[in-house]
Amino acid sequence: MPERLCTIQLKTNGIAVLTIPGNPAFSPGDLLGALQRQISALTGKDEVKGLLLTGPESGFCRCHIERSTSPSDAAALSGFGQQVMFHLGKSGKPCIAVIEGECSGLGLEVALACDFIVASRAADFGFPDIAAGLIPFCGGSQRLARLVGKSKAKELIYSGDLIDAEEAYRIRLVNRLYPHGNALAQAEELLTHICTRSPNAVRIGGEIVNAGYDIDLQTACMLERDAFALCFSSFDQREGMQAFLDKRQPQFKGE
């Protein structure tokens, strides 16, 4: 997929808006490859403070898997897709998926790999792939189960039904709901607020939540202890505490 179809808008506040098209004519390999290259380009820029991933109301990251795909090609596609999702999840910058309309299949897998999801009240979510004899392939089944619970994830994958934004919010798939047509603007406001915090602390906080989620509580708390201590070696910690004492806004550098 040509990169020009996967557009980037870098705002003056350091927020990068990555708009991913939804078109059944796109192959998942092309779409995933374009996404990986764009994420790499954005995360390598110091001026980029945070990422918003969004798409048209007609479908976020829609694509088409060829019927003639062989088992070996399917395994390679899944492996590549999972690699891209891990790459997105480890970008080191806060990343929010903003869903205005349908978010299904690969689109939902991409959204799940972001830090969290916000949506308009007109959005829908699901994994309809079961109707074609398929299941999620980029780690979506595992991320969904960790987010909404095993039994609810099975229901969504088994049925292939789409759920509306209200239900997605109720089961904690979506963090926030916004009026239709206003989700992107509201998400930018939220991410702008997040980006006023220490980039170091945001990055470390996200890494600790991810690392500790699937291990026992005592070990996870030890990771938190070490990460907390690491914060005290940073400029941002010294600046933040001094700004608090001075009753002024901190000037974080991400150092």
Image: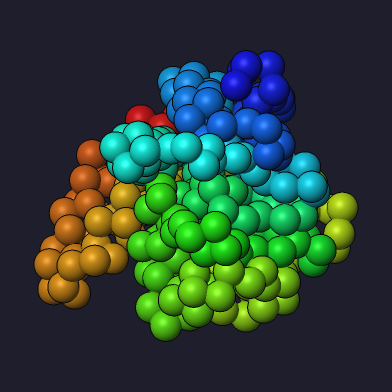
Relative depth, front residue between 11 and 60: 60
Give residue 24's position: percent from left, percent from top: 68, 39
The residue depicted at 79 percent of the width and 47 percent of the height is: 58
Q: Is residue 140 above or below residue 95?
A: below
- Quadrant including the N terminus: top right
Relative depth, front residue between 231 and 49: 49
- Quick check: can you spot residue 33? yes
Relative depth, front residue between 49 and 44: 44
The residue depicted at 67 percent of the width and 50 percent of the height is: 98
Left or right? Give the position of 63 relative to 84: right
- Quadrant including the C terminus: top left
Q: Is residue 16 above or below residue 62?
A: above
Identify the colour scheme used: rainbow
Left or right? Give the position of 49 relative to 90: right
Give residue 65's position: percent from left, percent from top: 53, 40
Q: Residue furthest front?
A: 68
- Quick check: can you spot residue 248? no
Give residue 214's position: percent from left, percent from top: 24, 66
Relative depth, front residue between 154 and 113: 154
Quadrant for residue 200, please give it.
top left
Quadrant for residue 165, please give it.
bottom right
Give residue 118's position: percent from left, percent from top: 65, 58
Left or right? Give the position of 187 relative to 77: right
Left or right? Give the position of 84 relative to 215: right
